[in-house]
C-alpha cells in the first residue's frame, strides 16, 4: 500500500532527497545573521506572527509528514519536545534555544541549510520576533478563539423606547433607566429627569450603581462605561410654620423665614433649630436681610414694608409703598443715608426708593419711584453690578435693565420666548436666569441677550431660580415639588430633589430656593417646611472597560465596590465574565469557559467571596473569586436562566427562568428547595427584597409579583405594568422597587406596601 502524504510534504521530501544533511558539517560561507529584537509591551502572537514564517521556511522538512530528525515544528508542543538534538525551544530563554541558534547561524547545522536555495533564511526582524516570543514564554495561542469582530453599529431608531435595564441608587432616591441607547437618570421623589447620558450606538441592556452610588456602570457593545455620579440628600428639615413658607433669607449664621401663618421665624442655620418666632400682624410675603446682618425688611399682604431688628424682631419702622401685597424685595445698596430697596407688588409694578436709617415711616412714600413693564406685569426682580442696576421681567417674556437710583430704562432684553416669566436671578458673571410658567428655564447673557442654555423638564411653573456663590451651579424649583441643580457651563443636570410623593403622586410646591453654600441649597415649600439639601460630584466618564466578545448583558459591583463583574458572551458559542478592579481599571479575572452560552445575569454573594452566574445554557453556577473555580452548578431549568440573586445571609439563591418558573436553591447542599409558579411567560428578572426577605420577579406576561420564599404561591402583585416587563431593581434597603417595560414605561413602587410612587412614560418625540 502506498503511503499518502500531502503535496507540501512531497515537495519537501523531493528537495531534501537531493542534498546532503550530514550532521555537524561546517559551512565556511555561512555568516551569523543579526537578531533585531523589537521593543514592545504587548505579547507576540504565535498564531499570527510566528507560525506563518515557520510554516513557510521550516515545516516542509520538520512537519508532521516528515518530521526530519524526529522534530515537528508545526506545533509549539512539538518544538518544546524537540528531536534528536533535544528541545528546539526553551520557553523564557531565546538565546539558549536551538531554533534561534541555528536560524541565526550561530551554530551548525544552520537552518535552513545554505545549499537549499529555495528556502531563504529568516531575516533579522523575523529572528527578533522569534527571540522575543520565546523570551516571553513561548505561549501557544493557536487554539484560542479569536475575538468576535466589532460590528459597525447604526444608531437605534428613535421609535425604540423599550426599557431594557434599570437600577435604583442604593438609597432609592434616583433611578437609572436604559431607554434605547440612552441612559435616563430620574429623581424619584420630585419626578424630575436629571440628565440623559449617551450609552453608545447599541441598546443599553445592563446598568449598575456602585454601592456608594458614586459610579454608574453602563453596559454596551463589547464595553462597559464607568460614569461618575453625583450624590446628595437632605441635610436638615426645619418644621414650625403652619402655613406656606413664602420667603427665606440668610445673614450672620441665621436663617429667617416668612410664612402665611403670620409669623417670621429665626433659625440657627447650622443646627436647624428654631431660635425665635415673631408674630406678625398680617402674612409676610418676602423677607431680606441687610448686608451687616442687623436688620430685616419684610413685606406683607397689606402692601406695607416693615424694618425689623434681626436679633429681637422688634419693629423699627413701617413703609406704605403699595396698595396690594408686596411679593418680593431686593436690597440694591446700603449707604450712610439708608438702604435702597426695590419692592415688587402683586399688581405687577415695582417701587424703588431709599429707606432712611432713622425710623422709616409713611412720610417716605413721596421719594418712591414706580416702575412697570410696559403693558405687561412684572413678576421678578434681581440686582446686578453691586445694585447699580435692577433687572425686571414679567408676563411679556422680556427682561428690562433699569438704573438702580433713577429707575430709568437702560435696555430691554427679549428672552426669545413669548411666555410669562415667573422668576429670575442674575450672576456676577453676567448671566441672567429666567423661569417660565411652562416648566422651562433659560440662561441668557445680559450683555447681548443671547440664550446660553435651555433648561427644560420642570413640572409646572418655575417659581424660583438661584445661582451658587461661585456661579458654576444654578437651581430651579417648580410647582411639582422638585428642585433641580444644573451645571451652568454645560447646561446639563447634576442632581434633583423633592418631597416624597403622596398617594396622589403630588408633592408640595417649592416657593423659594437659595444656595447656602457652594454645594448646598435651601428650599421653602407650600406645606410650611424648609429643607437643606447637599450634593457633591458631577457627571463625567471615568473610563471605558473592555473589550468583551459581544454585548454586556449583566453587571454587578462587589459589596465593597472594589470589583465590577460584567457578563455576556457570543450567543450559542460561549459565555464570558470579566471582573475588573475598579480603582485602576485593571482586569482582575476572566472566566471564558464557565458557560457554553450567553450569560444573562450575575450577582456577587453578600460577603463578596463568590459570584453567581445565570446563562442561556440553562445552568446556574457559582465560582470562588479567589481562584475562579466553580463550586456549584445548579441544573433544573428547562430554558434560559434569565437572572439570579442571593438571599441576604448568602445561604440561598433564587433563579428566574424563561421556562416561566422561579427556583430556590440551597448553596451549601446544592439542592433545589422549591419551584415557584405564577407567570404565564418568561420570568425576565428576579431580586430578593431585603428586610422582609421577599422574592420579587418580573415577567413577559406584564406582571411584577412577589413571593414568600416558604410559599410557592404568589404573595402580591405590584400593579401598573401591563406590557412585557423586561427588567427589575430594588433599593439596598428594600424600600423601593422599580421595573421597566417594552412599551417604554417605568414604574416605581413602595417596596413594603406595594403602593405606586411614580409612573414615568416616554417623552413625546416631535
Image (tube, grey):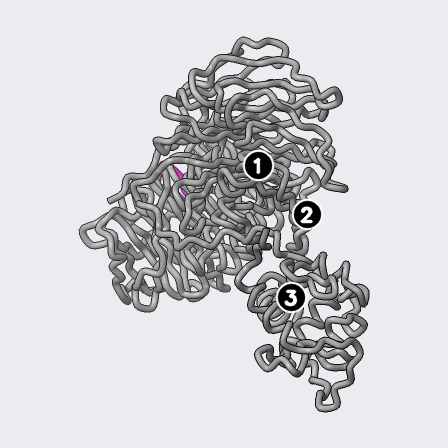
First along the sequence among labels 3 and 2:
3
- Residue 648 vs 42, above or below: the answer is above
**Dot 2 crowding, Cα within 10 Å, few <14, some 14–19, many 20+:** some
Residue 742 point in image, percent of width and height: 37, 31
Secondary-structure class at tag 1: loop
Residue 89 point in image, percent of width and height: 76, 66
- Residue 666 vs 632, above or below: the answer is above
Residue drawn at 70 percent across, 28 percent down: 632
Residue 380 placement, left or right of 753: left
Q: Nearer the viewer, residue 683 or 128?
A: 128
Furthest residue toward bottom: 29
Q: CA distance from mark 3 to mark 2?
A: 21 Å
Residue 26 magenta-highlighted: no
**Dot 3 crowding, Cα within 10 Å, few <14, some 14–19, many 20+:** many
Secondary-structure class at tag 2: strand
Which segment did they paint magenta? 298-302
Numbered circle sitting on residue 589 = 2
* Mark 1 in CB contact with mark 2 (< 8 angstroms): no
Q: In this figure, which residue is indicated by the disc labeled 1? A: 596
First along the sequence among labels 1 and 3:
3
Amino acid at each position: 500500500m502506498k503511503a499518502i502524504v500531502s503535496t507540501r510534504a512531497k515537495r519537501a521530501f523531493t528537495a531534501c532527497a537531493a542534498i546532503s544533511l550530514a550532521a555537524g558539517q561546517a559551512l565556511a560561507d555561512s555568516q551569523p545573521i543579526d537578531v533585531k529584537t523589537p521593543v514592545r509591551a504587548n505579547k507576540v502572537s504565535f498564531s499570527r506572527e510566528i507560525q506563518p514564517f515557520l510554516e513557510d521556511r521550516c515545516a516542509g522538512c520538520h512537519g508532521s509528514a516528515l518530521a526530519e530528525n524526529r522534530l515537528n515544528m508545526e506545533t509549539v508542543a512539538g518544538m518544546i519536545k524537540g528531536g534528536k538534538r533535544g528541545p528546539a525551544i526553551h520557553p523564557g530563554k531565546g538565546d539558549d534555544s536551538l531554533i534561534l541558534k541555528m536560524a541565526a547561524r550561530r551554530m551548525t547545522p544552520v537552518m535552513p541549510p545554505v545549499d537549499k536555495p529555495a528556502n531563504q533564511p529568516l531575516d533579522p526582524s523575523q529572528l527578533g520576533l522569534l527571540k522575543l516570543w520565546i523570551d516571553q514564554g513561548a505561549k501557544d495561542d493557536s487554539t484560542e478563539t479569536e475575538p468576535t469582530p466589532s460590528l459597525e453599529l447604526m444608531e437605534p431608531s428613535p421609535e425604540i423606547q423599550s426599557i431594557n435595564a434599570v437600577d435604583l441608587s442604593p438609597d432609592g432616591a434616583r433611578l437609572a433607566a436604559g431607554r434605547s441607547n440612552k441612559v435616563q437618570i430620574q429623581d424619584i421623589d420630585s419626578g424630575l429627569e436629571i440628565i440623559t447620558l449617551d450609552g453608545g450606538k447599541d441598546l443599553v441592556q445592563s446598568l449598575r450603581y456602585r454601592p456608594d452610588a458614586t459610579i454608574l456602570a453602563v453596559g454596551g457593545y463589547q464595553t462597559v462605561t464607568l460614569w461618575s455620579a453625583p450624590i446628595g440628600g437632605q441635610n436638615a428639615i426645619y418644621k414650625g410654620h403652619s402655613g406656606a413658607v413664602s420667603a427665606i433669607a440668610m445673614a450672620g449664621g441665621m436663617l429667617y423665614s416668612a410664612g402665611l401663618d403670620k409669623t417670621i421665624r429665626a433659625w440657627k442655620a447650622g443646627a436647624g433649630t428654631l431660635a425665635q418666632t415673631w408674630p406678625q400682624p398680617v402674612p409676610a410675603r418676602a423677607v431680606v436681610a441687610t448686608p451687616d446682618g442687623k436688620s430685616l425688611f419684610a413685606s406683607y399682604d397689606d402692601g406695607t414694608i416693615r424694618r425689623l431688628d434681626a436679633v429681637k424682631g422688634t419693629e423699627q419702622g413701617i413703609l406704605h409703598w403699595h396698595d396690594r401685597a408686596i411679593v418680593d424685595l431686593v436690597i440694591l445698596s446700603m449707604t450712610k443715608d439708608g438702604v435702597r430697596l426695590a419692592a415688587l407688588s402683586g399688581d405687577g409694578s415695582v417701587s424703588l426708593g431709599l429707606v432712611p436709617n432713622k425710623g422709616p415711616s409713611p412720610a417716605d412714600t413721596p421719594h418712591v419711584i414706580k416702575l412697570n413693564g410696559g403693558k405687561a406685569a412684572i413678576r421678578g426682580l434681581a440686582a446686578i453690578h453691586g445694585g447699580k442696576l435692577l433687572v425686571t421681567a414679567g408676563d411679556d417674556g422680556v427682561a428690562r435693565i433699569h438704573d438702580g437710583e433713577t429707575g430709568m430704562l437702560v435696555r430691554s432684553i427679549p428672552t426669545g420666548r413669548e411666555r410669562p416669566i415667573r422668576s429670575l436671578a442674575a450672576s456676577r458673571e453676567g448671566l441672567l436666569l429666567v423661569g417660565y410658567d411652562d416648566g422651562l428655564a433659560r440662561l441668557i447673557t445680559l450683555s447681548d441677550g443671547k440664550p446660553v442654555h435651555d433648561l427644560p423638564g420642570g413640572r409646572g411653573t418655575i417659581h424660583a431660580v438661584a445661582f451658587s456663590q461661585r456661579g458654576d451651579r444654578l437651581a430651579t424649583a417648580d410647582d411639582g415639588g422638585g428642585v433641580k441643580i444644573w451645571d451652568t457651563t454645560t447646561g446639563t443636570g447634576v442632581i434633583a430633589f423633592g418631597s416624597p410623593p403622596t398617594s396622589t403622586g403630588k408633592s408640595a410646591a417649592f416657593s423659594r430656593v437659595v444656595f447656602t453654600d457652594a454645594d448646598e441649597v435651601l428650599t421653602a415649600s407650600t406645606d410650611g417646611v424648609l429643607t437643606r439639601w447637599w450634593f457633591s460630584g458631577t457627571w463625567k466618564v471615568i473610563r471605558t472597560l473592555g473589550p468583551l466578545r459581544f454585548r454586556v448583558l449583566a453587571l454587578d459591583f462587589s459589596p465593597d465596590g472594589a470589583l465590577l463583574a460584567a457578563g455576556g458572551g457570543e450567543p450559542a458559542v460561549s459565555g464570558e465574565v470579566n471582573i475588573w478592579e475598579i480603582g485602576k481599571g485593571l482586569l482582575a479575572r476572566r472566566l471564558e469557559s464557565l458557560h457554553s452560552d450567553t450569560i444573562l445575569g450575575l450577582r456577587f454573594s453578600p460577603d463578596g467571596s463568590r459570584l453567581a452566574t445565570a446563562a442561556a445554557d440553562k445552568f446556574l453556577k457559582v465560582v470562588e473569586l479567589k481562584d475562579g473555580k466553580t463550586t456549584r452548578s445548579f441544573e433544573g431549568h428547562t430554558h434560559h436562566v434569565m437572572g439570579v440573586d442571593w438571599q441576604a445571609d448568602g445561604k440561598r439563591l433564587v433563579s428566574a427562568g424563561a421556562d416561566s418558573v422561579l427556583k430556590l436553591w440551597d448553596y451549601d447542599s446544592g439542592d433545589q428547595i422549591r419551584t415557584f409558579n405564577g407567570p404565564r411567560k418568561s420570568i425576565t428578572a428576579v431580586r430578593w427584597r431585603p428586610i422582609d426577605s421577599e422574592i420579587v420577579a418580573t415577567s413577559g406576561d406584564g406582571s411584577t409579583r412577589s413571593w414568600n420564599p416558604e410559599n410557592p404561591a404568589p404573595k402580591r402583585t405590584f400593579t401598573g405594568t401591563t406590557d412585557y416587563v423586561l427588567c427589575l431593581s430594588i433599593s439596598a434597603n428594600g424600600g423601593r422597587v422599580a421595573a421597566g417595560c417594552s412599551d417604554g414605561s417605568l414604574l416605581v413602587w413602595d417596596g413594603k406596601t406595594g403602593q405606586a410612587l411614580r409612573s414615568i412614560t416616554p417623552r413625546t418625540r416631535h
